[in-house]
Image (spheres, helix red, strand yellow):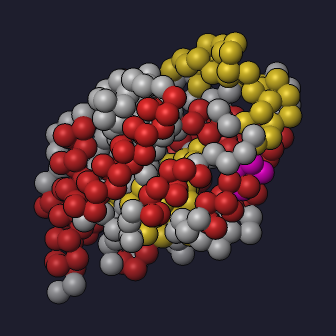
């Protein structure tokens, strides 16, 4: 009951990449960089286990960015001539690659990190990848010129990598879709269909993570504009409840999302975000246990997991460790209280 996991990313150690940045530059290159990525993965596996996290992640230590970390292995994209583009409905600007031809994988994407993680933990292992809609929203397309077509093409590549990860012993494959909270009509028109293509034929658990974004200023400012209640989930949860995905990861701690909306996800595992990634303040176990108890009013306990609101990549390393420890302790406290 109340198994713990994380949304995906964790801060990169200062000896691996620039600290406290969402798009950090690597400190090393060549084999030294590859070795450092492996070492960082092991560091964070141990930290998660020590904190009592039940379903661990590689922490995305081998990726500069959660979207481009996958796209760098895709042919048909020009990374040499990036363009500045507004993403997430122009919430902020980013330098993005350009789709110049049909997309296809050059080979495996996350083979090494999955191999390292699987060999060094006996716990359930989750690997995260960007969802098709969010990838479409993070590139400039001059080839397909149709978002749904590009999404389906990218979903095919995700499916190829997902099957290979499953064969390596990965227990949960999660697709990150922050764009789902921005383009709600497209979610229902083609976004979920693209996710279905990405998970086609998989036997492992499948999840989609939908949040209000990393704890960067552009996202914090956007949240302030959303009013007293954040009801974006209300538009997409019914469609997700009917989907073939097993799990839905959502943002809850310190958010203005009405907890009652979780009942719209009937039949799904719900990964309740109980760690706020937009503040350095570390939650207390009591606060986390209280949030889990509130969520349990709307989600059957056997379907309720404790998670983070989003990835923690830009966060200070010591703060992230403390928050992981709080998550583990809070879930344990919730189990004790609600088992009575």
Q: Residue furthest front?
A: 31
Residue 225, horizontal then vertical, whole percent = 41, 28
The answer to which image quadrant residue 278 occupies is top left
Residue 73, horizontal then vertical, whole percent = 68, 37
Residue 209, horizontal then vertical, whole percent = 51, 52
| Membership of 297 in magenta stretch | no
Q: Residue at x 43, y 40 (%)?
A: 35
Q: Residue at x 40, y 80 (%)?
A: 302
Quadrant including the N terminus: bottom left
Which residue is nearer to you in this view: 337 or 40?
40
Where are the magenta residues, as a range? 154-159
Please give left or right for residue 15 compared with residue 180 in the image: left
* Residue 257 in view: no
Quadrant including the C terminus: bottom left
| Membership of 157 in magenta stretch | yes
Residue 183, horizontal then vertical, whole percent = 63, 38
Which residue is nearer to you in this view: 309 or 257?
309
Name above or below for residue 36 compared with residue 171.
Answer: above
The answer to which image quadrant residue 196 occupies is bottom right
Please, what is the dominant secondary structure of the magenta stretch?
helix
Please give left or right for residue 327 compared with residue 215 in the image: left
């Amino acid at each position: 009951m109340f198994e713990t996991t994380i949304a995906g990313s964790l801060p990169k150690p200062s000896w691996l990449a620039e600290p406290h940045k969402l798009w950090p530059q690597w400190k090393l290159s060549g084999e030294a960089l590859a070795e450092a990525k492996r070492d960082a993965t092991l560091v964070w596996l141990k930290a998660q286990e020590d904190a009592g996290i039940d379903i661990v992640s590689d922490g995305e230590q081998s990726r500069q960015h959660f979207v481009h970390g996958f796209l760098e292995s895709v042919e048909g994209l020009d990374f040499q001539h990036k363009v500045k583009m507004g993403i997430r409905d122009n919430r902020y600007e980013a330098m993005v690659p350009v789709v110049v031809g049909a997309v296809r994988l050059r080979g495996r994407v996350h083979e090494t990190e999955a191999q390292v993680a699987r060999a060094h933990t006996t716990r359930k292992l989750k690997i995260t990848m960007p969802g098709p809609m969010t990838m479409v929203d993070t590139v400039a397309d001059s080839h397909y010129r149709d978002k749904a077509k590009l999404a389906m093409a990218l979903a095919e590549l995700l499916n190829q990598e997902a099957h290979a990860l499953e064969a390596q012993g990965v227990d949960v494959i999660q697709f990150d879709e922050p764009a789902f909270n921005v383009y709600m009509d497209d979610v229902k028109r083609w976004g979920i269909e693209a996710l279905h293509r990405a998970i086609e034929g998989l036997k492992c658990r499948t999840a989609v993570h939908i949040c209000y974004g990393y704890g960067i200023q552009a996202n914090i400012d956007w949240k302030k504009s959303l009013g007293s209640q954040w009801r974006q989930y209300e538009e997409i949860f019914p469609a997700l409840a009917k989907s073939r995905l097993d799990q839905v990861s959502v943002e809850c701690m310190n958010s203005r999302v009405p907890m009652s909306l979780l009942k719209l996800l009937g039949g799904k595992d719900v990964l309740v975000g109980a760690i706020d990634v937009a503040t350095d303040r570390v939650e207390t176990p009591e606060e986390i246990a209280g949030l889990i108890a509130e969520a349990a009013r709307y989600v059957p306990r056997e379907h309720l997991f404790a998670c983070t609101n989003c990835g923690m990549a830009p966060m200070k390393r010591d703060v992230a460790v403390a928050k992981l420890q709080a998550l583990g302790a809070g879930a344990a406290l919730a189990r004790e209280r609600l088992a009575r």
